Amino acid sequence: MNTRSFGSQLKDCIPVSDFSAAGAFESCDVINRGFTNVKSELFPVHPLELSEKNFSLNQDKMNFSTLRNIQGLHAPLKLQMEFKAVKQAQRLPFLNSSNLSLDILKGNYDCIGFEDILNDPAQSEVMGDPHLLVEHKLGLL
């Protein structure tokens, strides 16, 4: 007599497809991940677009290397520690922060840019649920 149960015999004989939601009809989590963006999947349209996107990073690298050559290794390390400390001090996730202290450290407090006049698109005025935003930032969701 076969000691295997009837369910295990059926499982061996009949192929059952996986009914998970990871297929073509998967519902996307719009609240936590946002809308899908086709533009992010495309290559840069213009050759200078990548250079302009990384302009501030390249400028910081150049300033740090110049500062290292002039004053030594301690000066860029001290500035990087100050930048990191200033970036960590911020408001709650559902409140916009101007990061004025970071602008003062970088010397950008007297420059008027696109985000000063037309606002940064990443900082929209639409406020989400504060509890969900804090849980998402803490990694609880």
Image (cartoon, rainbow, N blue to C red):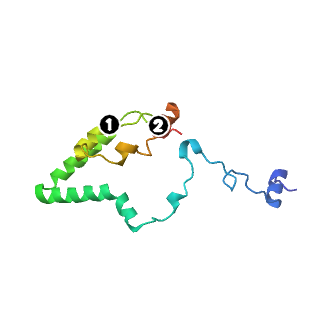
Between residue 129 and residue 115, name the one nearer to us: 115
Residue 85 visible here: no
Q: Residue at x 67, y 51 (%)?
A: 26
Between residue 134 and residue 4, name the one nearer to us: 134
Callout 1, which amino acid?
Ala
Q: Residue at x 32, y 48 (%)?
A: 113
* Distance of label 2 from label 1 (alpha carbons): 21 Å
Q: Quadrant of residue 13?
A: bottom right
Q: Which residue is mark 1?
A: 89
Q: Earlier in the sequence, mark 2 or mark 1?
A: 1
Q: Residue at x 13, y 56 (%)?
A: 72
Q: Are marks 2 and 1 in contact (CB under 8 Å)?
A: no
21 vs 93, left or right, is right
Callout 2, which amino acid?
Glu
In the rendered image, residue 47, in percent from the top left (x then y), is placed at 40, 68
Residue 62 visible here: yes
Q: Quadrant of residue 32?
A: top right
| Crowd rating for badge 1 (residues with CA inside 10 Å; few <14, some 14–19, many 20+) | few
Q: Which residue is mark 2?
A: 125
Between residue 71 and residue 47, name the one nearer to us: 47
In the rendered image, residue 129, in percent from the top left (x then y), is placed at 53, 32
Helix, strand or loop at mark 1: loop
| Crowd rating for badge 2 (residues with CA inside 10 Å; few <14, some 14–19, many 20+) | few
